[in-house]
Structures are given as structure tokens and as C-alpha cells.
Amino acid sequence: MSATRMSRSLRLGVGLACTLNLLAAASPSAHAQNSITGYWDLRIPVGDGTSRETFFELNANGEAITGRLLSRGPHGIPLAGTISGSAVHLVATPPVEAGRTRPPMIFDGTYQGDKLTLESKNRRSEISKGDAVRTTKEAALPPAPLPLPVLRDLPDNGLVRTPPMGWNSWNKFAGRITDADVRTMADAMVSSGMSKAGYVYINIDDTWELGRDSSGNITTNSKFPNMKALADYVHSKGLKIGIYSSPGPKTCANYEGSFGHEEQDAKTYAAWGFDYLKYDLCGARDVYTLSEATERGLYQKMGEALAKTNRPIVYSLCQYGDFDPWKWGAKVSGNSWRTTGDIEDKWASMDKIGFSQIAIASYTRPGHWNDPDMLEVGNGGMNADEYRTHMSLWSMLSAPLLAGNDLRTMTDETKSILMNGEVIAIDQDPAAKPTQSLSKDGSVETLWRGMQDGSIIVGIFNRGDQSAQSGFAWATLPGGLGGKKVQARDLWKHAAVATTGDRFDTQVPAHGVTLLRIASTRN
């Protein structure tokens, strides 16, 4: 599956229509029966044998309600509201973290007798219902932090010398992903030609977990009855398979995390046959007051555990760019590290995330990749020009190319974007040279990047809402090509570009791109 994102237990549960049946403790007083004061465990069945839990501390004083949403750090999220008659209004306000502000979570509903009904919508407009039971402070609060290892530099695991390519379940399926979906997605990756284009990994994101058995081994829920058999199936297609966890007690969607079980879980993943681990920080925010040293320690702990398995497992750090992971991610044996909050299938989100990466592009290198999050190509929130910009920019950045759409129902247009071999070749260039800014002119930003063969890539990106004319003088080309005779190719039109005259000029559609590969001629 978050800028530091709120946990998916909040995105999927807190921002939903919820019915809380508040069950009183044994022999409660009449006052207790009619008060929402106390600690509550909201349990929302999600249809796979598990329930999503969210803990509340509520204090009623007349018509005023205060309290905390007991998630996102040791102190929770402050909550305030009112109860007037049977009408309830609650607002949880996330704190500003790393200079990032998140919108408040608003709950409106009714409280009658021992039943509280609340409604709100998350960003996916999902609605669900659940029951809450009265609990204790000790049960509601997160566990105490565990000791972290002494910081040291772990060795490079030698994997993914070019950015990993594949598919991840979260953007399209979120918590609805199943074993059957993963199998048919693997089938589609092969039948569509994506595997031949370089897409290899089929990655299961959050919501596969159930709990732990009596020996502490992680178990799967009803959506994933046999992980070893699933991994074997994906491998039989010539593909690799990935899994997801968190260093916290719970994952982002409030499923079982790896807290205190790092070596045990890594051994299980290896025994099942997994080739990739996405390790998502958000659950650890419930336990630790985070710092660079703490985050590095948490990720080092799992990095050490993966190394002990003696299985090659790509290690993907997902902690949203806090504390500059591009400076230390490789030291915990990380192969990639998220540099931003969650992407959305919207132009504004993709544009903001993508162009923010230029400043840190020099930190990417073979085996260690800046990760601006997964691709949204084909999910329907942007048009074809915007998706071509998305694919072009991610490829110029040497970002992991992890498709996030339904591979089984791709249109020809989506296939043409995701499987443009000339664009993929930019991403997979073994030199992994950083993308740099060439020029800015109003809404148009021109980027360039050197390639291993001496050619350069020039991307003319129109970030504006109207079509724009733009270009450059051939004599100003970077990479040692200025003043030389050159040949050029448009990578989206798959056609040669005339290099006569002094300049190249083009009309770039709104939110679109012209992407060129330019090389010197041999005569």
C-alpha cells in the first residue's frame, strides 16, 4: 500500500461509516451505561477471518467530548467533539509531522443507549461497519518499544542492479486482494507480454495476514490459504513474488506486523519462496518516537534477518522519505526506499511527487533506488497524456516500475504506455545516471539524463493546463553533444526527429511530454 501517511487502519477504518455497539463492563452503573467515557476497541470484520481494530479513548463532560484516537505514535491523535441529545460529532486532528499537515478525520453519528453510530468516508469512499467493545487502558495502548540493534553498515545484497519491475496489489485492490487475484495477475503479466518487457515481480501488499500460531509463526487469513503453493504457481510462470510487512505490531491496515518476530518472519517468507519484501513503517509509529537512528535501527533489524535466510530477497523500505532514507537506506541492505508519501491517481499528486525527485536524483545507483511510489497507469484517474508523463518521468528517475492497475483488463492504450520498450530502456539503463534540470520556461520543464552508450534523454514536460510550444537549440545540448551533428528519436511517436536547422521545437499537450533520445552521428 503512506509525506508521512496516516496508517491504513485510519484510512480504511477511521474514515468510514462505523457502527459502534458500546458494550458495558460487568455490572456497570446506570451512569456508565449512558456514557461513552472509557476505552473502546472498534472491530470491523473485513471478510477474511480478521477484524480491523481501532482503539479510542473518549471522555464526556456534559456535551463536550475529548480524547484520543490511539494510533499513530505513543500519544495517539487528539480527538474532540460534542454530544447533543443523540447527535455525536467527533474530529480527530493528526499532528503536523516533518512539516506535513493531514486533514482532520470527522465522524458524525448518533449515540443511543449503548450504541454509537458514526459515519464518514475515506479517500476511496469506502463504507464499513463494526462493533466496539469496552476495553482497558493497557489493552488499548501500544506495547513498549523493543531494543534496537547497534547501528552498523550491512553489506550490499547484490540484487536488482537495475530498478525492479513488476506489479503491486495496493493501488487497485487495497484490502480486496486474494490468492485467486494474484494467480490471474501472474497469468496476465505473461499473456500480455509484460514479462517479456521486463516486468517480473508480482507483489502482494497489505491484508494477507491473520495472526500467529502457538509457536509465534505468522499465519495467513482465508484470502490466502497456502502461500507456498501460491509462490510456486507464480514461479512456474517464470516470475518472482513479493510480500509485505511492518516493523510495528500492526501493519498499515491493522493486520499482524513483524514486531518482535523479525527473524521468525524472514525465515517464513524464505520457506514460502518469496523474493521481495516491502517493509512499511507506519505500524511502528504506534510504538516508537521516531528519529533517523530509530528508523535505521528498525530497518537494520529486518535487513539482518533477511540476510540470515540465505535467500535472495529484495528489500524495499517504505517509510515515506522521513529522515532522508536515500542517505542511509543502503546501509541497512535496502534495495529501494520510498521518498514520498502515497501517490494518488491524480495529476496533482503524480506531478508533485515526480518533480520533487530531481533534487535527490544523485542518490540513486545500481542496486539502490529512490522510490517515488508505484505506478497509477491505467487506473483511470488521469488521461493518456498524463500517464505518458508519469511513465516518462519515473523512467528518467530510474524509479522502480511497479504497475498498480488490473493487468487482466488493460486497454491497448494502457499496454502501449506500460510496455513502451524505448521508455523502459531509460529506466533500465545500467549506468543509472541522475536526471538533471536543463531549463524551465513558464509551465514547461525540460529534464535530461545521460545514458551508458553516450546518448542523452531529453524530456520536455508541460506541467501547465494548456498546450505549450517549447524546444531548445541543438547547440545547447548537454552531455557533450552541443555543437555536434546528432540524430534524435521521439520515444512516444517511435519516429526519427529531423535535426536540421538550429533548433528543435514541439507542441507539448497540457500535462504531456515530448521524450527524445539524442545521440551523435558517426559521420
Image: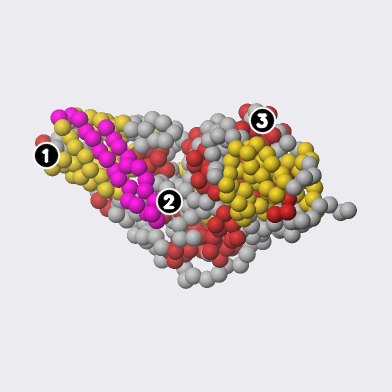
Q: Is residue 258 magenta?
A: no
Q: Is residue 330 above or below residue 396?
A: below
Is 100 in the magenta?
yes
Q: Nearer the viewer, mark 2 or mark 1?
A: 2
Name the one closer to the observer, 221 or 156.
Answer: 156
Query: Marks 3 and 1, Cα distance to the nearest angstrom?
Result: 59 Å
Q: Of the residues shown, which amino acid type is indicated by label 3?
A: Glu
- Residue 350: x percent and y percent? 53, 42
Q: Is residue 405 above or below residue 245?
A: above
Query: Residue 85 is drawn in which quadrant?
Result: top left
Q: At 55% across and 57% down in the image, what residue appears? A: 359
Q: Secondary structure at mark 1?
A: loop
The residue furthest front is: 502
Residue span colored magenta: 85-108
How many numbered dots are placed on residues in this image? 3
Q: Which residue is mark 3?
A: 413
Query: Which badge, 2 or 1, is on the more N-terminal residue?
Result: 2
Circle 1: residue type: Gly
